[in-house]
Structure formats: C-alpha cells, structure tokens
Amino acid sequence: MKLFHTSDWHLGRMLYGRSLLEDQRWFLRQVFLPAVERERPCCVLIAGDVYDRQIAPVEAIALFDETLSQLLELGTKVCVIAGNHDGPGRMALLKNALRHSGVYFATELSDALTPVLLEEGGERLQLFLLPYFDTAQAREFLGDGSLRGEGPCMERLLEQLLPLFDPEAGHVLLSHCFAAGAQT
C-alpha cells in the first residue's frame, strides 16, 4: 500500500514581503499532482501546517480546495491534521461531510480516537490522526491537571490509542509535533 506523506505546505506564506502563492500553485499543479497521478497512492497524508497562519488568505483556501478536488478526482483518499500554524476551528468546517468523499480532517484531540481504515490489495492499515496540541489542551482532554511537558502528554495520548489497534492491520500515527530521542 502506497502513501504520500507531506507536511508544512504553508499556503499563503509571505517571504520578504512577497507572496509565495503563485510558486505554491505552480508546485502543486506541475509537480505534486502529476506525481500523485503517476504513483497512484492509496492516501495522501498532510501532517499539519496546510496554511501559514490561523486566518488563512482566501486565495490560499481556494488553492487548497482546488488541490483536494484534484486529489479526489485522481481517486486517492486524503488525511489532514491541523498544525500549529493552522486554525483548527476553521479547518474543521465541513470535516464530517468530507469524510464521505474520502477526505479526513483531524482538528481536535478526540479525532485521533477514530482511526481511518485503509484497505487495498488485501492489506489493512489504521491511520491515527493526531493534530498539533499544547500541554494545556492535552491536560484538559485527558482530565489530568498534573501532566507537565510535551513528552508525558504525548505518552498518555498514545496510551489512549493502543487499545484501538486492530491486530489484523498495520498502524500509522500522523502527528505534527517535535520528536527527539525516539527508538523503533
């Protein structure tokens, strides 16, 4: 099963007072979408920071919408998590309706508790979509005010996911976070 992993598109980014939107549009149309068409992944993963700021420019939203539409026309599913630059509440618009089309958004911690199941060629894969979070959000979600630091919060969140693992499937965690010192 083939997946395309991407992140940090930062659509609408300004660099030294110049909009990068036309460059981003060119890349998506001339490089990214043709690669998806050629390689035919089962799913495109976007691991946060779709936009460069929480209130994204209308042009950036339109480009993302155009790209999602093209991906669906190519027959691929799309999984998107909110990053620290994204406005998760704004990204959540129509997320439940879009699930029926094969576009899965994770904008709040509870979304990670409903894995996306991909099936292709006899293979099964559970995707756990964990959006960006800060420690205060994790403490509130987990109901544990004693948690301090990103590491303990992440550990407790991952403990919530383990019982959801289907033993007959592979498992992938899509997250937008800082990681160091990990082992496989």
Image (tube, rainbow, N blue to C red):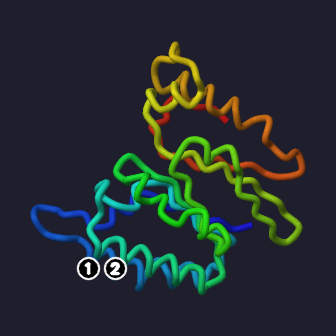
User: Under tag 2, what secondary structure?
Assistant: helix
Which residue: 59% across, 86% down?
73
Tell me the quarter of the image containing the N terminus: bottom right
When asked about the image quadrant of residue 118, the answer is bottom right
Q: How many marks?
A: 2
Cα distance in 3D space between marks 1 and 2: 5 Å
User: Under tag 1, what secondary structure?
Assistant: helix
The amino acid beneath tag 1 is Glu
What residue occupies the far top of the structure in this picture?
146
How far across and down, in percent of the image, does residue 108 sit? 53, 46
When asked about the image quadrant of residue 54, the answer is bottom left
When asked about the image quadrant of residue 91, the answer is bottom left
Q: Which mark is residue 22?
A: 1
**Which residue is the site of mark 2?**
25
8 shown above or below 120: above
Q: Is residue 162 left or right of residue 16?
A: right
The amino acid beneath tag 2 is Arg
Q: Residues within 10 Å of mark 1 (few under 14, many from 20)?
A: some
Tell me the quarter of the image containing the C terminus: top right
How far across and down, in percent of the image, does residue 5 sit? 55, 61
52 shown above or below 121: above
